[in-house]
Amino acid sequence: MYQLSEENLAVRDAARDFAQQELKPGVIERDRKMQYPAEQVQAMANMGFLGMMTSPEYGGGGMDTMSYVLAMDEISRIDASCAVIMSVNNSLVCFGLEKYGTKEQKEKYLSRLAPGTWLGAFCLSEPEAGSDATSQRTTAVDQGDHYLLNGTKNWITNGSSSDIHLVMAQSDPEKGHKGINAFIVEAGWDGVNIGPKEDKLGIRSSDTTSITYTDVKVPKANRIGEDGFGFTFAMKTLSGGRIGIAAQALGIATGAYHLSLEYAQQREAFGKPIAKHQAISFKLADMATRIEAARLLVYQAAIRKDQGKDYALASSMAKLYAAETAMQVTVDAVQVHGGYGYVKEYHVERLMRDAKITQIYEGTSEIQKLIISRDILQGNLYVPTMV
Ligand code: CAA
């Protein structure tokens, strides 16, 4: 079995205290009002939670993926909106830039993103290109010293609160996905227009918008990687991002489970706590078992990434299973709470609404099954041991 390090445990405890003290107060109200958690995001930056895995050279925490997963889990138990803001900045934007950016790009952008001075967004989805990510309609036409960017991106987390967008766009349609490039775009540049905040089912206080780019001049120096590397960049970066969302789903499920366990031991019906009725105790048993299985898959994906092994398959398995677990567990948590579960004060209805998005963003459950089944059919399934 994998032993959590001293650093892992310290991060987990710090994130647990932080979530209780800084995120829990007001979480219901922020959800109700769709209020962006500006103070809480600043507090996450102060705690070093926005660039946890980035090298200290660029203002990050220099921690392993396991510490990041543990922090995501703890924060998601309380406030999944704050968790997605943190996840996108850490595992899509900072990780993508650190792994594939130039030294100049890292000095200019990563050194501001990792400490949370700036916030980033990852702009792949479009109104007509979600799961089918190779069919990018946004164009980036080579103009010599710069590209001219035109198009619309959809469902962008941190849409209006970000300073930097990592934007995927098609530069050579004849080459298909090999014509796609990835760019660093500053939110303040001419031609960048942010749409209104989406009124969502869950993660309501996080900020999701469309973004339109009209004749935006992007310097060549802001392209990430070689010409045509953009789709591979998006896929490789998303493999890490999915570990973060898997940890978010795990945290949502765990939060709902803890609330259900506590409630079931206090609430009495037919002369005894409802936890002593098999109808409820079996639900708790199912919740606990699913959560533990999800936890092992999430840890396995993080460990493989930390050990430098291929982790795309492990990350898809973790995201698929953790997201399905989050949905099932939160639906059961509402059921355990009965009528109380249906009102906002008891938190579980929010967790149920928040859980749904984990089956959709950073690749739907169906896309994870596509990725997993392709790997299996190609004979790539590794023996799933923990180390
Ligand atoms: N790493 C490296 N390369 C990869 C890869 C990976 N994990 N996955 C695919 N590729 C490569 C393939 O090898 C292939 O390259 P070659 O042609 O050179 O072999 C290329 O990418 C195209 O792949 P496919 O042929 O498999 O393309 P496809 O269209 O059949 O399938 C897909 C691609 C897996 C469905 C992909 O489009 C996908 O992952 N879709 C989901 C998109 C997604 O996750 N969107 C999330 C939006 S971001 C978000 O939600 C952020 C937020 O704000 C919260």
Image (spheres, rainbow, N blue to C red):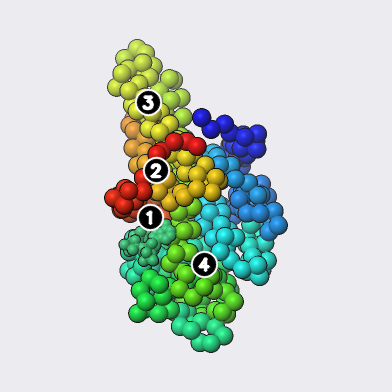
Of callouts 2 and 1, the N-terminal one? 1
First reached walking from the N terminus: tag 1 or tag 3:
3
Residue at the bottom extreme of this rendering: 144
The earlier-in-sequence mark between 2 and 4 is 4
Q: Nearer the viewer, mark 2 or mark 1?
A: 2
Taking the spot 38% from the left edge, 32% from the top edge, the residue there is 290
Contact between marks 3 and 4 (CB within 8 A): the answer is no
Q: Distance between the residues labelled 1 and 3?
A: 29 Å
Q: For the point 37% across and 13% down, which residue is it?
A: 272
Q: Residue 284 carries which label?
A: 3
Q: Residue furthest front?
A: 379
Q: Nearer the viewer, mark 3 or mark 2?
A: 2
The disc, 1 or 4, on the residue closer to the chain's N-terminal end is 4
Q: Distance between the residues labelled 3 and 2?
A: 32 Å
Is 86 rendered above or below residue 337? below
Under mark 3, the amino acid is Leu
Residue type pointed to by label 2: Tyr
Task: Please state which of the two labelled residues, at mark 1 or mark 3, is closer to the viewer.
Answer: 1
In the image: residue 149, left or right of residue 133: right
Image point 58% across, 33% down: which residue? 4
Precedes in sequence: disc 3 or disc 2 = 3
The kind of residue on which mark 1 rests is Gly
Figure check: 107 above or below 69: below
- Answer yes or no: is residue 231 visible: yes
Give the alpha-carbon distance from disc 3 to disc 4, as whole Å: 42 Å
Residue identifier under label 1: 363
Is residue 380 depicted above or below 153 in this figure?
above
**Residue under label 4:** 166
